[in-house]
Each structure stands twice: as structure tokens, then as C-alpha cells.
Image: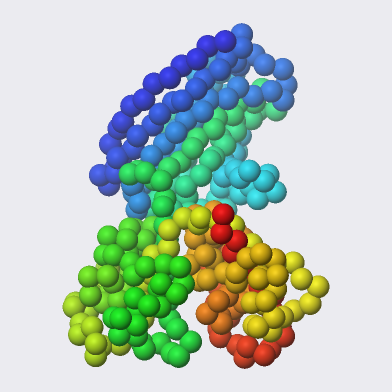
Amino acid sequence: MFLLERAFCAKEKMTSLLCITIISLTLAGSAFSLPTGSASQLQVKVFADLGSNVTLPCRLLSQDAMAFGNNGMRIKWTKVEDDEALNTIVLTSMGFHKKTYGGFENRVFLQELDNEDASMVITDFSRDDVGKYHCEIINGVEDYMQEVSLEMLGGLIDGVVFPYTPLVARYNLNFDDAVQACQKQNASVATFDQLFDAWKGGLDWCNAGWLSDGTVQYPINNPRGPCGGTNNGPGLRSYGRRDKQISRFDVFCFSSALTGRFYWLVQPDRLTFDEAVQACLDDGAEIAKVGHIYSAWKLDSYDRCDAGWLADGSVRYPISRPRKNCSPEEAAVRLLGFPDKTQKSYGVYCFKEQ
């Protein structure tokens, strides 16, 4: 058995810093003379800046590239989860035929520096790209697999920024109202750095909101007419500092990692808002807040296509795996609005503190 550990850093294009740590390589005899269906595995860890292009390495050794041949090599990249049913195919390649899938469509491609190279490039790296990937190289006789863990440079993801509009209406919060609104949702008013980081991670929102420094800004990744115009590039649009008592806007809140369990409470019937609150209490929990659902969705990849009551009287559901009838275009926390609280049409999301 052979254990290899090494680390190196290389500059990516677009000034991104790519750090790769090869954490383990285990070989038994010749890794490329395994029985049919077996696969040698190399585990690699890659770090990247938000918004950068990042390469996930996957290569054959020279002698094995000869065995596979240029035309017979089939490549499959998959983003894997603890539950295999949630695995997502990212890219497949067979000769000249290549296909990308889902949120990776037209955003990833094979590097193909030579016949031995099956490395994949992800453009515009975002928080949603963080995770574990499998690269499989197959020729029907001998298989090769490499595992790559992709993480954000600068440490673990420790929170999520989300825009918040209260029940009363859009643009109805002065600064003090904004602080209280975030606190009520298990969050705090986001800082400029937190919003900037969220923008680099793909946040695009056309409503202006308060930040903790008293400025009012909003993040745009897809420039368009009603949101600052098409002549301005992507970035944070700023209204500057505003009067904290008189000015009225929405707010950007920041919610940290959960300190308990966020979950869908299974019930035989749909509930009114008051029934939803009581159902969570009866289960030894509280009705979940907006900050809870965003943290569970963004940081824990919580996914459920059922609309449920939250503590502010809104009805929402979190989708981390876009699919038909469940936010097909993007991963998001979907808002159905603030329905009549006596309406018996929804379930409930609860939160139980550890």
C-alpha cells in the first residue's frame, strides 16, 4: 500500500488562486490492471475564489492513456451527495460528443490539454459548486475514478445573505425597522463584505436594501433595464448612505450556520398559521424563521418541494435541486407570499434548538 501526500498552488486565469492538495492515493499492485468494473481512486482537494474559474484535475498515467486510446475514452463527471439519489451529473464526454447538465450547462468544459487529460473547468465558481465530485474514465474493460473535493478559498461557508421584505410591503423599513426585522428572523443586518461575497457567489436581486453601515445597495449579476440599466456591468448598485429614520427600503439579512435542526413536520392535514405554530410546539420545537430556512437551504443543501408556514406568516419552500414544478430554473428559497393566516392550505417548517 502506498500513501502519497503533497500540496501545491498554481495561478488560474482571471487571477484566481487554485490550491490543490492531494490528500491520499492508495494503490494495490498495479492500479490500472484491476479486474473489470474496479476503479483506482485518487482523492484531491481544490480551493477556489468565488467568481473565478477553477480546474478539477483528473488525469490518466501515460501507460494507461495508451491502453484507453483517444477515441475509446468515455468521461463522466458527477457531483455526489451523501444520499446517492441526490447525485447530479455534471458532464459526459464520448469522443466529440459532449454534454453538460442542469446548473452546470454551458458553464463547464473539459480542459483536454492532451490525451491523458480529463480535467474539468468550472467557470464563475459559486457557493453552490462547493462539494464532492467524481471523475470516471471508462473504456468498458478498465475503469478509473478520481474524487475531487471543491471548497471555497478562505475557509468554510459560515452564513448566508438573503433579501427580506416584510408583510406590509416593499420599501417599508427605516434602518431601525430593518435591524429588528432581521433579528426577528434569526439573522442580523448584512455587512458590505457579506453582501459582496454573496454577489460573487451569484446573488442577483433588484430591490435595494439596508446594510449594517447605513448604506443602501443591491447586487446585480445579470444587468437589465429595470435594475440599473444594461450599460452598467455586474456589481453592487449603491444608493449611498441614507437617512436612517426617514428613508424606507428593504434589508439584506445575514444568517449563520444553524445550531439546531430545521425540518418539515409531517402532519396528516394542512394547517392554519395558528395550528402550525402549535404543531411545532407540540413537537418540542418552534415554528421556523426565515433565517432558519435560508441557512438550511444554502449551508446544508436542504431541499423540499412542499410549501410551509414560517414564523413571519410567510409561506416558502427550499429547493437546492432544481426540477420540474420545483423551481426548475435555479436553486432558491421560493416565496408564495403572506396568505390569509386562517387559510388551511399549507404544512409547516419547524426548528428545534440543540
Residue drawn at (40%, 29%), measured in percent from left and top? 21
In the picture, measured across the screen, residue 315 lies left or right of residue 184, that is: right
Q: How many marks?
A: 0
Residue drawn at (24%, 90%), measured in percent from left and top? 246
Residue nearer the viewer, 351 or 133? 351
Residue drawn at (72%, 85%), measured in percent from left and top? 344
Residue drawn at (30%, 32%), measured in percent from left and top? 10
- Where is residue 261 shown, x and y percent of the image? 59, 57
Position of 62 relative to 122 (above/below): above
In the picture, measured across the screen, residue 107 lies left or right of residue 175, that is: right
Q: Would you say residue 36 is visible in this rendering?
A: yes
- Where is residue 80 shown, x and y percent of the image? 60, 43
Residue nearer the viewer, 299 or 43? 299
Q: Quadrant of the C terminus?
A: bottom right
Give the quarter of the image for residue 324: bottom right
Give the quarter of the image for residue 69: top right
Residue nearer the viewer, 277 or 80? 277
Q: Would you say residue 208 is visible in this rendering?
A: no
Q: How is the image coloured?
A: rainbow
- Where is residue 234 shown, x and y percent of the image? 30, 66
Position of 153 relative to 50 (above/below): above
- Where is residue 172 shown, x and y percent of the image? 36, 89
Q: Quadrant of the N terminus?
A: top right
